[in-house]
Image: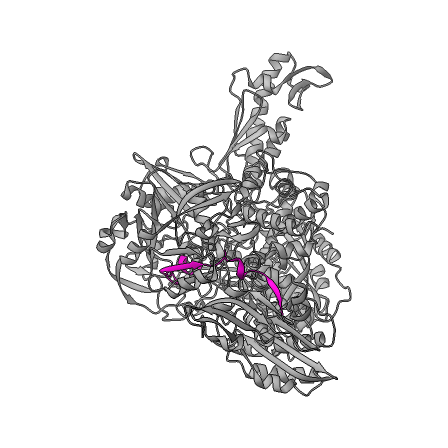
Amino acid sequence: MAAVESKQAQQVFIRPDGKEKVTGVGRYTADLNLTGQVHAKFRYADHTHARITRIDASKARALAGVFAVLTHADVPEVRYGGMVQDRLMFAKDAVRFEGDIIAGVAALTPEIAAQAAALVEVDYEPLPAITDYESAMAPGAQLIHSDWESYGAEDMGRDGNVLGHSTVIRGDADAAMATADAVVSGRYVADASQGAPIEPRAIIAQWQGDKVTVWTSTQVPFAARTGVATVLELPESHVRVVVPLLGGGFGSKCDFHFEGHVAALARAARRPVKLVFSRHEEFIAPDHRREGMAVELETGVRKDGTIVARRARLVIDGGAYCGEGGFFAQMAAMHAIGPYQMENVSIDSYLVYSNNQPSSSIRAPTAPQACWAVEQHMDEVAAAIGMDPVELRRRTLIERGKASATGQIMDEIGIRETLEAAAEMIGYGQDLPDDEAIGVACGWWPSFGVNSGAYVKLNGDGSGTIITGAMESGTGAVMGLPILAAEVLGMKPEDFSILYQDTDAGPWDMGSSGSQTTFNNGRAVICAATEVREQLLDMAEKELEASRGDLEIADGVVRVIGSPDKSISIADLAGSGTPLLGKGSGDVPEAGPSDIASHCIGDLGLTAFLAPQLITHAAHVKVDRDTGVVRVLRFAAAHDSGKIVNRIGADGQVYGGVMMGIGQALTEGTTFDSEGRQINPHLLDYKLMTASDGPEIMIHWEEVVTPNAGPKGSKGVGEPPSVPTSGAVGNAIAAVIGRHVNQLPMTAERVWATSQENGQ
Amino acid sequence: MSATYLAAASVEEAVNALKGGARCVAGGTDIVVGHRQGKKPLPASIVAIHGIDALRGIAAAGAGLRLGALATHEEIESHAVVRERFTGLADASAIVGSRATRANGTIGGNVMNASPAMDTGAPLICLGATAVFQGPGGTRSIAVEDLFAGPGQTVASADELLIAVDLPAPALGTGSAYVRLEYRRQMEIAIVGVGAAVTIEGGKVTAARVAITALAPTIHRVVAAEAALVGTDGGRDAAAAAAAAAAAGSAPISDVRGSADYRRAMAAVMARRAIETAVARALGGQVSIPASTSTFAAV
Amino acid sequence: MKHPITLNVNGTPYSVDVATAQSLLYAVRDQLGLTGSKEGCDDSECGACMMLVDGRPTNSCSYLAVQADGAEITTVEGLGEGDELSPLQQVFLEEGGVQCGFCTPGMLIAATALLQANPSPTAEEIRIGVSGNLCRCTGYDGIVRAVLRVSREGASV
């Protein structure tokens, strides 16, 4: 059904960047070459945890064809990091994970650069490596950062290897637990996983005088610009970041990564320098992967399904550096509660350093793993009181107008409707063969209200240009902006070109992260277009000798309402020589208050969720009992993302997010050896789902027009489709094998082993 | 770094080059990947055989079939006679890599890479296939069963070119199958695979071969599993006993793809499915190709 | 050692010298400047580099350029007619088969090969046929729909 129904039936929306993508003429960063360019390679750490006692790059520098070799001694000693300043560009005194960079080389060919990188001599004193991140909290554990106290960010609850500590305390969980009819506890452990965009990252830097232009595959060009300016001690005006087409990111290309290294190399080499990652590097080097997590849950419930109390303890593997992951402890704590009503909660959530690859935002960071744990736990709670799992959710999900577990009043939310829609689409309750079952899971994710800006200008021929700081990672969010501008200006979306992904052109924007582009930049574009609209009306008032109240803009003209012959085209107004230029950012919406913030540790302002996106997923799976191999046959995704602005784009996020979620559920796990090296940093053993693994996916949008949200009452769309996916799959597996798999991904071997434990 | 390259136009030319120390490529995949990943240096001298027409195609050879060394997996899995009488081989060729792998990958390349995880080895052994080599001194045949010497190694000498794989006509009442453990439905590498060929006459198994893949340094037969089948009716109990013997005859390792315990258990599951499928086909039943797909979740 | 070869790419013959170890992907991207075909991995696991070589879908990252001497090669740049998109290219856009676009060139080649071999594939056959091409954005749904539509509308690929 949905799998073959043509999108034509809905709405044909051709992405403005579509033609260049299907013809192969579109340029991604690795497709660019500059005259005179030389090639960069990095020398990575030889240990996952060691003191560096000597670095000697002289042999590397002496190799013919080498233009520059840089170590920490050759760049300003600037410690950086968005929340915690714990990172140097090049390792100086210590290495802390396998992707730490000792040196960068620029040489005539990539082969010579690799050869030179290998010639850099490094002496180490190895230190004990901590890869079992829970043990990082043990008293006396080897410190990953001996000088952690100098890194700032005291409000995160930092202490030694504990990088962040957040609590959510409301009511009296201990006392309430004693009143429960049943208390259910469980422990769930999720492995790390990867964003794994199909485009490995690439960066080219070229200096012109004392200014540098960096072409890079980043999701966050403005953060990259700030990063380069910070580590090279330049004014931001001396750094221009341009993103050619971006080949996906899924969070892994958020934050500032390697642009500083390449810019520094280009300055030293006096040549443009190009860096292109191999797939192996794309796995091990970025300080960005989905965090491993251990979740312990305890829930007290009454026979009628009322949750009287929830206790939870979470330990999250932050890896060697904080990156942008500083908010993970609190975010995971919010997902340990979920979109349920409960009066008494006590959540302790720790983010810890380890010698594993650093964690940072990957599509809804912390949520899929925590949600997977909580939603399987909810099914166990239902079993303990003999209640159907959907019925338990029906009774406990937040009702419209009621308070969340943090005391935030939820006015316009459609979580209960998503539950019913998903259950109906999947055919919940139907008879199935005994190796098949349906599992259901619910989740949530906030929208992020941040500043964002755009300019809209009209050209002499009546066409328009949107100049935006927003970033198009593939989702179509930027490609959909003309729809919003066109509506305001009575024009057609195809009348607009978009100038984007150039920090010298558009106003600051957070980038392609936090599902925020339509939410915030959409507002900015509407605001900018509205300014232009006012300018058009000003001009038309004079031209048509009509008062403003009598004018309307539609179909490319400004006309007097009721007198269609009294009109002037937008092209004529725009062609008159008067500049028509609007700018906008709009008012940033803020989350309503929670009633707990004041007495929680490590509060970073996430105890209330702005315009929460609400999701129910239902998975119909078949389990090969003898092997543990699971196939997802059918999948229902019901989402409240508010009003949907671009249906084909929103659907695309769900199809892609669900498939990513199924991969995370079943096959995608990064495995570390005992020293924190990845064992499977390649696509044969880090298994993304193929087309043949894809189920039939059914989608329902519960279009709650949401106040205090994005354009037209919209919320974010991009991250939620991966949130409850693995929970739904896990519940379906458990319904077949009679026991919950408590490790993620739920690989064939783990499903088989769990099934064996259950004596099946 | 610098390597010589010859695109051979004939078998003789290729053999001459091999004699001079060249290494043979058909599709090139392994050599290019190994070189680019820095795992294996490029051979100093390469002879490409993809242009030798004499090595192409699948043809009747007596009552059996001759697969040219350049026969692709796609040609093999879609060949009517292979599907009908050498079904286990079709099961294997149908699941190698992706469609691109099957369109380019050849039986010769697959066999001579001698990977313990390659899919066509087990069914070839079970079907009694022989590898035909041309060397400086003429041709010789080596049973595929005797060909593999270790991971990436065969008993053929460096100046011998594999020119064909011969499949003898199976006895009447023979069915064969190859079943592999698959985490994904495509793009998999064998973690556990089992091939089986079973001949049934008058309700009794008169001959059986069982070979296991990716469970030891080489793909090999498990005689105890075969013995457990011969003389039985080939029913569930016999298949289970043979499967247990196949698992006992494996020497699995533990790595990121699975623990030794899991692999050993899966050896029994895959063996049972392969044997049951071979028996069903021997009895004239239709089990669709590839058997890995059609036996998914079979109980 | 360099070898003079002829690559017939999208109907145009190009004479180039290639090193023995050079992949077809490198030759087409770096020497011919046709960068539509992408490099997403280096071991035939992702399909972003896929080209047709004498009609066969081929991972060009793992194929020696010298072996393609004289072969007819089709890349994504050769699928349309001049400025006109092929039906498959057009429908990929209409059905949401393109997001970031990085897998798209290889995916279009795989789908083209599939439809040439089997003009009326089922959804299942399409999914098997493009399984060598990893896509992280679309969940494959729009891609499968697009191929189905082209086959139903009977447009020549």
Q: Quadrant of residue B96?
A: bottom right
Residue B60, above or below A152:
below
Q: How many marks?
A: 0
The stretch drawn in magenta includes residue B48: yes
Specify whether B126 is left or right of A94. right
Residue B284 pos. (x, y %) = 74, 74
Residue A427 pos. (x, y %) = 76, 59
The residue lying at 55 percent from left, 36 percent from top is: A587
Towards the viewer: A4 or A48:
A4
The residue lying at 53 percent from left, 64 percent from top is: B69
Residue A585 visible? The answer is: yes
The stretch drawn in magenta includes residue A171: no
Towards the viewer: B29 or A592:
B29
Residue A469 pos. (x, y %) = 48, 37
List the single residue furthest toward the right: A431
Residue A440, above or below A491:
below
Question: Which quadrant of the figure contains the C terminus of chain A?
Answer: bottom right
Specify whether A626 is left or right of B159. right
Q: Quadrant of residue A295?
A: bottom right
The residue lying at 29 percent from left, 41 percent from top is: A267
Residue A406 visible? The answer is: no
Q: How is the image coloured?
A: one colour
Residue A401 pos. (x, y %) = 68, 50
The residue lying at 56 percent from left, 31 percent from top is: A527
* Span of residues in magenta: B33-61
Residue A657, above or below B122:
above
